[in-house]
Image (cartoon, rainbow, N blue to C red):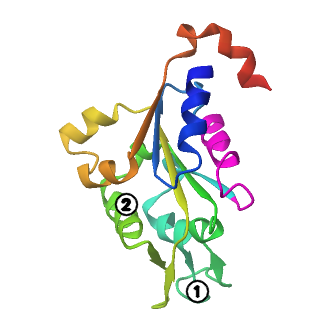
Amino acid sequence: FLKMLSLVMRVAPTDTSVLLLGETGTGKEMIARATHEASLRSSAPFVAVDCSGLTETLFESELFGHEKGSFTGAIARRTGLVESATGGTLFLDEIGNLPADLQIKLLSALQSKSITKVGSNKIIELDVRVICATNAPIYDLVKKGSFRQDLFYRIKTIEINLPPLRDRKEDISNLFH
């Protein structure tokens, strides 16, 4: 745990993207939050998004927001989760579960550092640090072509592997504080 914390403290002041890899329950979100809290962005929002819960129909609206009347049920203008993280950190949990067509939309936003709300043509510039996490075998997914290689390289400037808790029993109590 101290080794990971040391790495977090070195990575936190930078604005580089971070990819956290590890089994479910290894503390990936805790490490993401610790990275945010130790960063220069700590006074801005930390917005966590569970990518496995995003459907194709909700993806753009949830992440990028929408304008009133842009689709049936859009009764008001909505700020998306990405815009909500402005100045802070966007934590994309379970990124390995994101369907291929949604990976393209996310990659486009990360590359251009901008988004457009559903039903709008106004470009919104992004100022967010991106931290991603997955328990999926992402290297295998990239090799098989089910996870985009270009997105993979965009999100893994720094990679942190979290060993299973069974291999670090001394850390279990740290996860409950």
Residue 114, given in percent of the width and then of the height, sits at: 45, 76
Residue 50 vs residue 124, the one in the foreground: 124
**Residue that appears at 68% across and 84% down:** 76
Q: Say left or right for 32 vs 148.
A: right
Q: Amino acid type of disc 1?
A: Glu
Residue 63, given in percent of the width and then of the height, sits at: 54, 66
User: Tag 2, which secondary structure?
Assistant: helix
Residue 150, given in percent of the width and then of the height, sits at: 26, 54
Residue 145 vs residue 166, the one in the foreground: 166
Q: Is residue 82 above or below residue 136?
A: below
Residue 113 located within the stretch drawn in magenta? no
Q: What stretch is highlighted in magenta?
A: 29-45
User: Do the numbered discs 1 and 2 sit on residues whose CB atoms are within 8 Å?
Assistant: no
Q: Amino acid type of disc 2?
A: Leu
Q: What residue is pinned by disc 1?
A: 67
Which disc number belongs to residue 102?
2
Which quadrant of the view contains residue 46?
bottom right
Q: Quadrant of the N terminus?
A: top right
User: Tag 1, which secondary structure?
Assistant: loop
Q: Is residue 59 above or below residue 164?
A: below
Q: Quadrant of the C terminus?
A: top right
Residue 96, given in percent of the width and then of the height, sits at: 40, 42
